[in-house]
Amino acid sequence: MPVIEARPSAIEFDPGSAALLVIDMQRDFLEPGGFGAALGNDVSLLGRVVAPCRDALRIARAAGIAVLHTREGHRPDLSDAPRAKVHRSPPGLRIGDPGPMGRILIRGEPGHEIVPELAPEPGEPVIDKPGKGAFYQTDLELMLRNRGIETLLVAGVTTEVCVHTTVREANDRGLRCIVLADCCGSYFPEFHEAALAMVAAQGGIFGWVSDVAALRRAMGETGRDTA
Ligand code: TIU
């Protein structure tokens, strides 16, 4: 079985019972005028994550590792959007308000789509979630159990918000989480680092931290990706 170098220790995993979970790589978080920007963030910080995520997707697909994607967003009538969440942005920049990529964080709008470089391939499930955690009010757990998934390779944004919440949820459900550090990003570099440190601390209290180069080596590939 492949072994991937990671913190706090290398870990063995079976590609047949592993899945790459790509979290919320949506235009709403990565491009100007979306939800991330509406919250006051510098969205340009997240662009560097796209190329490593593309590498991870290519490696996983080639290795037969299942791939799943998530998107954070709400129904057009906002019936699944907590008022407390909607009211946290200033009027005019709230969930459901019109923006350059359509209504902010609303399913079906251009801003809600995954960035084209990381577009899901046919057969790869896309889980629409109303919250930060990918297990909350979704059928992700059922899908993973039906596929016999035991290990999650985790990528996406943002490290300390949706990635961390999802890793915590997954860890409590008995899944082994390997967070790919360079495939995750934050509007706050210091939070990114702290969030990764929290995962691997205490002997791996929430999981393991690795990167896309280690994944490539674990899958027996050599050389560098050019994506
Ligand atoms: N604001 C922020 O850092 N993140 C989110 O609102 N959602 C995700 O992390 N996907």
Image (tube, helix red, strand yellow):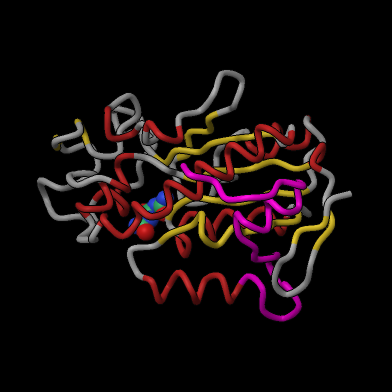
Apparent side of residue 9 relative to residue 90 in the rendered image (left or right): right
In magenta stretch: residue 226: yes
What range of the chain is rendered magenta? 199-227
The residue positioned 48% from the left and 54% from the top of the image is 162
The residue positioned 81% from the left and 40% from the top of the image is 17
The residue positioned 25% from the left and 45% from the top of the image is 31
Apparent side of residue 155 relative to residue 150 in the rendered image (left or right): left
Measuring from the top left, give residue 173's x and y in whole percent: 74, 52
Of residues 181 and 136, which is closer to you in this image? 181
Location of residue 171 (image quadrant):
bottom right
Of residues 172 and 57, which is closer to you in this image? 57
In magenta stretch: residue 46: no
Of residues 37 and 103, which is closer to you in this image? 37
Of residues 4 and 25, which is closer to you in this image? 4
Apparent side of residue 164 relative to residue 81 in the rendered image (left or right): right
Measuring from the top left, give residue 49's x and y in whole percent: 43, 53
Task: Name, please, the residue furthest toward the front.
Answer: 223
The residue positioned 84% from the left and 51% from the top of the image is 2
Task: Name, please, the residue furthest toward the top.
Answer: 122
41 is higher (above) or lower (below) than 126: below
Task: Name, please, the residue furthest toward the bottom.
Answer: 202
Measuring from the top left, give residue 156's x and y in whole percent: 49, 50
